[in-house]
Amino acid sequence: MGMPAGLEKKGNSGMEFADIKPPYRHTAFYCSSIILLGIVMIFLPGIIGLDGFNGGFALSFLGFFVAIIGIITVIIFARFARLAEAILQKQNILAHWTYTPEEWKTYTEEEHTDDSSDKRALFLLVAIIAVVVGIGMGLVYRDFLLIFYIIAGIIAVIGLTAYLSTVMPYHWNRTHLGDVYIAKDGVYLNRRLHFWKGLSARLRKISYEEGKHSLPRMIIEYSSTNLLTANYYTARIPVPHGQEEAARRIVNELSSRKNS
């Protein structure tokens, strides 16, 4: 049986990603500290003698929320670890590409510009929502100073998260020559997992784009749904020189799977 379209490699990264353990299991372990923080916040008012009507109930409620977020985060990253490892084991692989240093450097700068613009817009939206919710909580609990500190803290955490989510991939892309695995149900791009398999995940749109950036790109838009909202994501995959036709075939195949 021949190799799938585009499975041939281009360039030399110096190391196979299949020989590197994905970071998601470590992240899941470290995120367990968020659960501990939430539990401490729940019982902290009783420990320090803070009256419930003077902010104790609000602090305990926030701690419960933080603990739930921690549990969800650990579950998500544990699942990411399993999915990433399956892709790196080349299960249902459509293509595996590496890039020349020149190709990857150009992509890194252009992707950082696009990613920063997207994260700034998302941060502003979430910050506005947090302020509106904070005003509502202030009207209910009549403790505007405490609510102000809580909302300011949440916005600060969101801002730091948005900042790190752009700076860390940018730093990684600058220090490591890229590699991408494209599978039928996901993409592993330079240690970043994009996946649209599961009851809550859905492949929304896939397209081939050229002319806008220095290298053609495969644009994959997908979503995952939680209990309240649908989250939307975009994977922008650079197409190395000589792989344009393979990329078009992959786009057609994934589009067919989505439509079916």
Image (cartoon, rainbow, N blue to C red):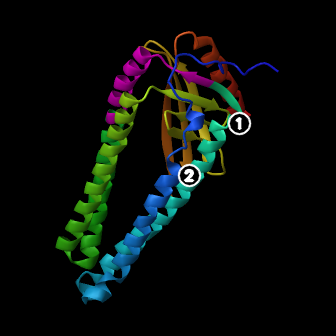
Can you say whether 160 is above or below 153 in the image?
A: above
Residue 242 magenta-drawn? no
Judge from the rendering whether residue 6 lies leftward or rightward of residue 40; answer left or right.
right
- Quadrant where the N terminus sits is top right
Judge from the rendering whether residue 252 lies leftward or rightward of residue 191; answer left or right.
right
Q: Residue 88 at x, y = what percent?
A: 62, 37
Q: Is residue 105 visible?
A: yes
Q: Is residue 229 visible?
A: no
Residue that sits furthest to the left in the current view:
145
Q: Residues within 10 Å of mark 2 (few under 14, many from 20)?
A: few
Rounded to the nearest whole Å, what is the CA distance between mark 1 and mark 2? Answer: 25 Å
Residue 97: quarter of image: top right
- Quadrant where the C terminus sits is top right
Q: Residue at x 52, y 19 (%)?
A: 12
Q: Residue 177 at x, y = what percent?
A: 44, 25
Q: Which residue is at the front of the view, 191 or 236?
A: 191
Residue marked by disc 1 = 91
Mark toward the start of the polypeptide (1 vs 2):
1
Can you say whether 30 is above or below 88 in the image?
A: below
Q: Residue at x 35, y 40 (%)?
A: 168
Task: State whether the magenta stretch is mostly helix, strand or loop.
Answer: helix
Specify the segment rendered in magenta: 96-116
Q: Which residue is at the front of the view, 208 or 259?
A: 208
Judge from the rendering whether residue 140 lies leftward or rightward of residue 228; answer left or right.
left
Can you say whether 181 is above or below 154 in the image?
A: above
Label 2 secondary element: strand
Residue marked by disc 2 = 225
Q: Residue 199 at x, y = what percent?
A: 66, 51
Asked whether the beta carbons under mark 1 and mark 2 sit within 8 Å of each other, the answer is no
Residue 17: quarter of image: top right
Three-letter amino acid code at the position of disc 1: Gln
